Amino acid sequence: KAGVTQTPRYLIKTRGQQVTLSCSPISGHRSVSWYQQTPGQGLQFLFEYFSETQRNKGNFPGRFSGRQFSNSRSEMNVSTLELGDSALYLCASSWRTSGGTGELFFGEGSRLTVL
Amino acid sequence: AQSVSQHNHHVILSEAASLELGCNYSYGGTVNLFWYVQYPGQHLQLLLKYFSGDPLVKGIKGFEAEFIKSKFSFNLRKPSVQWSDTAEYFCAVKTGNTPLVFGKGTRLSVIA
């Protein structure tokens, strides 16, 4: 069974640009969560989608947005990139939304570097 | 809001030494508890989990964790570490319908 797939794995952008990251969950999983991982802050929750609806949102500015498609694949977008957005962006999928057990299955992440 | 504290930022141990990584959370209601591990260059993977029942849970690769409700703690232990245990370890807590909250992680370096 294929795991969570994230693309691209690595990307370099400059300040002011925008970026779109993609995530394909494990087959049958309908919930997709996004986290930002940085050395100083660990994993910080961005948002969660279930059945194409945003169910939870973390404390990030409006430059960070996401969506989920009918096949459960998800994208997140960051506009007007800042240096501080450099991070590993992790996607995780699960069977159920946040009302479930909380067990998440993670992808390998998309490493974004902003110059 | 729930918060998770991992007391050690970086732990260095010799092979065969015993390991204990601390994890405390702030909200004392019903919780689901997790330890995830991230080996160098690999994705986060589940090490063990606690939902209910026996507070001593066993996970993969000889790891175990003990849930002490009165102390809001879920410490990770391993009697004898190996070089291959070098990784970053994350404690995570789930409360109600809120998203999974992670600690900032503990980097474990095991030296020969």
Image: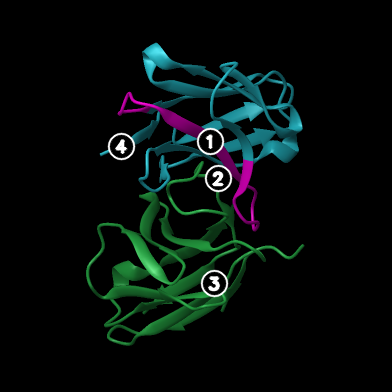
Chain colours: A green, B cyan
Residue at x-position 37% and y-position 35%: B4
In the image, which residues are magenta?
Answer: B25-46
Label 3 or label 2, whichever lies nearer to me, is: 3
> Dot 1 corresponds to which residue?
B34
N-term mark: 1 or 4? 4
Q: Are marks 2 and 1 in contact (CB under 8 Å)?
A: yes
Q: Quadrant of residue B47?
A: top right
**Element assignment for label 3:** loop
Callout 3: chain: A
Label 4 or label 3, whichever lies nearer to me, is: 3
* Quadrant where the image shows the C terminus of chain B: top right
Q: Which amino acid type corresponds to the residue marked 2 in the rendered image?
A: Glu
Residue at x-position 35% and y-position 85%: A18
Q: Mark 4, residues whose alpha carbon is within 10 Å: few (<14), some, or many (≥20)?
A: some
**Element assignment for label 4:** loop
Q: CA distance from mark 3 to mark 2?
A: 17 Å
Q: CA distance from mark 4 to mark 3?
A: 28 Å
> Dot 4 corresponds to which residue?
B2
Residue at x-position 57% and y-position 18%: B53
Tag of residue A114 = none
